[in-house]
Amino acid sequence: MTDTTSNQMWGGRFAAGPDAIMEAINASIGFDQRMAAQDIAGSRAHAAMLAATGVITDSDAQAIREGLLTVLSEIEAGEFVFSTALEDIHMNVEARLKEIIGEPAGRLHTGRSRNDQVATDFKLWVRDQLDAAESGLLALIAALLSQAEAGADWVMPGFTHLQTAQPVTWGHHMMAYVEMFGRDLSRVRDARARMNESPLGAAALAGTSFPVDRDMTATALGFDRPAANSLDAVSDRDFALEFLSAASICAMHLSRFAEELVIWSSAQFRFVTLSDRFSTGSSIMPQKKNPDAAELIRAKVGRIYGANTALMMVMKGLPLAYSKDMQEDKEQVFDAADSWMLALAAMEGMVRDMTANRECLAAAAGSGFSTATDLADWLVRVLGLPFRDAHHVTGALVARAETRGCDLPDLTIEEMQETHAGITEDVYSVLGVENSVNSRTSYGGTAPAQVRAQVQRWKDMLG
Ligand code: ARG
């Protein structure tokens, strides 16, 4: 169906309205209505500035600012009727404002364009999401710190290649994720600081001849300063891309942890028990308790990476300044933001509620010849062997234990001495897992004292 009336906002030179297909491909109101609050905040700041600089009268500005609040309350109440013919949130709001206040509404768009308007709205929206991500990360880090503190000295196997490597502590493993999410937190804060410049007043691309006060609108909207180049201000989507790349890296961390939780909660590992609140059952197998939240976190990462790649592709070929391609930025960011915030909250809930099965962790920590490195280190320290030789001797002892079907501490002193004559009873003192973790006191090592120091460092840093 083709509309025969041209667009009331820009249709002056048009004799006919757009084809229905044109309208469908052009409209963004189906999704950009999520920026209604930001759009109205931007317009209110702009109207106040236009009055302060004498571009419009105080009474017009007041009518506009009050009318915009009415529009906002209609949208919040779900009473607003969004129109596809009006394309986007900017024109939907302005058209409704005109219905409410009449003629002064037409003065709002003085000295600005939808290009600086949309860049401003979208920045405000992304900035809110960076703040939400910061809160989500802080909550997740707090949950990890509690786990780490409780289990600073609980032993568990540490893996490389998912093969038993050396014993570590539960607290140490939790603190590894604190480091990762801590870097995510700093990326979020960096991105926020860098993006906090106001595009408003850049107008279509070249600035405006009206005496706008860009510092005033920047301050009103919580920006640190106005963006310094009008061409860049309207065509920059780095802030959205930084949001998506910070989200992607954080999602990768969430996914790795989710993968560990899936493995750890299996009947074969039994390292953790996830709470009923963050698990689901099977409709056919009554014994099942599935780690669905972890699996979905792992899966949502794909959407976030997809959004990052999609927006990179949208932007890479665009000449300055604005092109309509850039309208494709929002759905990607909206979807990624929803996925990221949900994944952060779900991970926080799982971590807070989960129980580490200390006995299973301890039993697994001692299996798989996990103290072989401690044995080799003993040969170096006590017998003065070169490490390479110590490695070789230890390997022979591991092979021996494997043949006998026992662990390293179960080998007799005679068996040890057959492999290397210099070995004494003292060697057994380093073959226990507790000893192994307690000995790794190097900075950043797994010793409980180190873990407790790191927990304290993070608590001090986060305040
Ligand atoms: N809906 C548009 C977007 O999301 C708003 C800006 C339109 N600007 C224009 N010159 N057509 O990007």
Image: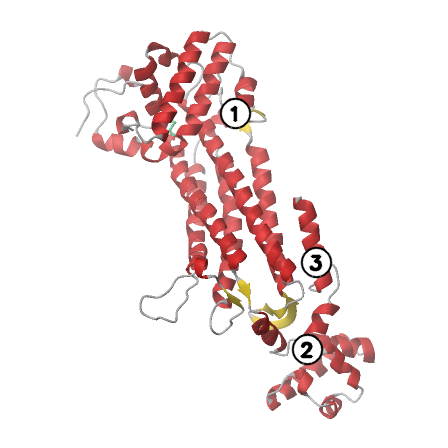
Give, as a three-letter code, the residue at label 2: Ala
Q: Nearer the viewer, mark 3 or mark 1?
A: 3
Task: Look at the image and tell me whether residue 398 can be seen.
Answer: yes
Asked which secondary structure carries label 2, the reply is helix
Q: Secondary structure at mark 1?
A: loop
Disc number placed over residue 452 in the picture, else none: 3
| Mark 2 crowd level (few <14, some 14–19, many ≥20, 10 Å Cα) | many
In the picture, measured across the screen, residue 420 lies left or right of residue 132, that is: right
The amino acid on which the numbered mark 1 sits, given as a three-letter code, is Leu
Question: Residue at left 44%, top 21%?
Answer: 43
Residue 146, given in percent of the width and then of the height, sits at 61, 56
**First in sequence: mark 2 or mark 1?**
1
Q: Is residue 140 above or below residue 201?
A: below
Q: Give the image quarter of residue 94.
A: top left
**Residue occupying the point 37% across, 11% down:** 104
Measure the alpha-carbon separation of dots 3 and 1. Answer: 42 Å
Q: Amino acid at mark 3?
A: Arg
Q: Can you give x and y, in whole percent of width and height, for residue 239 in the image?
A: 51, 36
Along the viewing direction, whichever of 367 and 376 lies nearer the viewer: 367
Instruction: Determine whether label 2 and label 1 are within 8 Å by CB.
Output: no
Q: CA distance from mark 2 to mark 1?
A: 61 Å
Of residues 257 and 373, the one nearer the viewer is 257
Q: Which residue is mark 2?
A: 372
Please give the name of the residue rendered at 70% of the width and 47% of the height, measured from the top-left corner: 460
Please tell me the numbered disc located at residue 221. Answer: 1
- The location of residue 410, given as percent across then percent down, is 67, 87
